[in-house]
Image: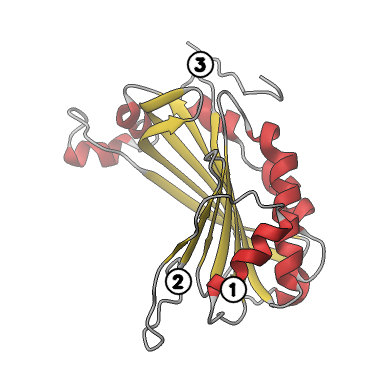
Amino acid sequence: MEKNPLIIDSQIGIFFKDSIKRPDELISIINGELDGVFDQMPIILPVPPDINFIDVPIVTLNSSNGEYTCTIAQSRLDFYIKGIGKQGFSDIKTNFLEKSNKILNKIKKDHKLKRLAFINRFFIKEDKDSEVISELIVKKFKRLQGETNIYSTTVQYSTRETFNDIVFNNFTLIQPSITTIKNLFNHVKGVLITRDFNTIPENDYSETLSKDVLGSIMDWSESKFNIDKILEIIWPIKVTQVTQGQ
């Protein structure tokens, strides 16, 4: 049996050094940079001026085709591109990098950025999702609670690595999921693998992020996805990567 990892979405998280008071003022700026791709009515959360909602998305922008989303909080902006059909990251990478750079370069003109996150979510069909994930847990631990009638299993692992003098959290999350991918399937059971590379919150990288670094960060992170190796561990069988154009 072959396991095909599909890209659910790619996300870029842009953290402002100083929180912004009016996230809604970025709507026309972002949409202008992306040639009006967000053609649905913006969703704006009314926030009283005396309440601190710094991390809550106040603005949500969506495209009518369901492929693009942008959320804006007072502390950060997140941009997403969803995979369609049998796509891998390589199928959306060029478009994602181009649009992310447009947003990033525009935002940097008026705001200093403290942190950056690059997140990708992959999905693999699997009826026995929690059972196969549980194989990543040592038997000594599983015996404490029992190794049968497994209901839910989640594995989370994080390390720190340095790239071009930037320290990143290298984060992996493996969990059961029921997922929909446009033009392919609806509400299908399987395993969700999240690969998240984000600059550590202790350091201020505003000077570094003022330069053109997104492309190199994305290339470095992609080289460390290790999705094929993760799949070989979960399913010790032949796996198939989704290639460009498949």
Judging from the image, the colouring scheme is secondary structure
| Tag of residue 73 | none
Identify residue type, mark 2: Asp
Q: Tell me where residue 227 appears, x and y as whole percent.
A: 58, 33
Rounded to the nearest angstrom, the CA distance separating label 3 from label 1 is 51 Å
> What SS does tag 3 mark?
loop
Quadrant of the rendering where the C terminus is positioned: top right
Label 3 vs label 2: CA separation? 42 Å
Identify the mark at residue 55; answer none if there is no mark. Answer: 2
Q: Earlier in the sequence, mark 3 or mark 2?
A: 2
Helix, strand or loop under label 2: loop
- Residue at the bottom extreme of this rendering: 50
Q: Residues within 10 Å of mark 1 (few under 14, many from 20)?
A: few
Task: Work out whether residue 125 or residue 165 is closer to the camera in this orientation and state it.
Answer: 125
- Tag in front: 3 or 1: 1
Q: Where residue 75 appears, x then y in whole percent?
A: 53, 74
Q: Is residue 63 visible?
A: yes
- For the residues labelled 1 and 2, the Cα–Cα distance comes to 17 Å
Q: Could you tell me if residue 223 is visible in this image? A: no
**Residue sitting at 56 percent across and 19 percent down?**
239
In this image, 73 relative to 221: left or right? left
Residue in the picture at 78% in, 52% down: 215
According to the picture, the residue beneath numbered tag 1 turns out to be 25
Question: In the rendered image, which quarter is residue 92 located in?
Answer: top right
Crowding at dot 2, Cα within 10 Å, few <14 / some 14-19 / many 20+, comes out as few
Which residue is the site of mark 3? 237
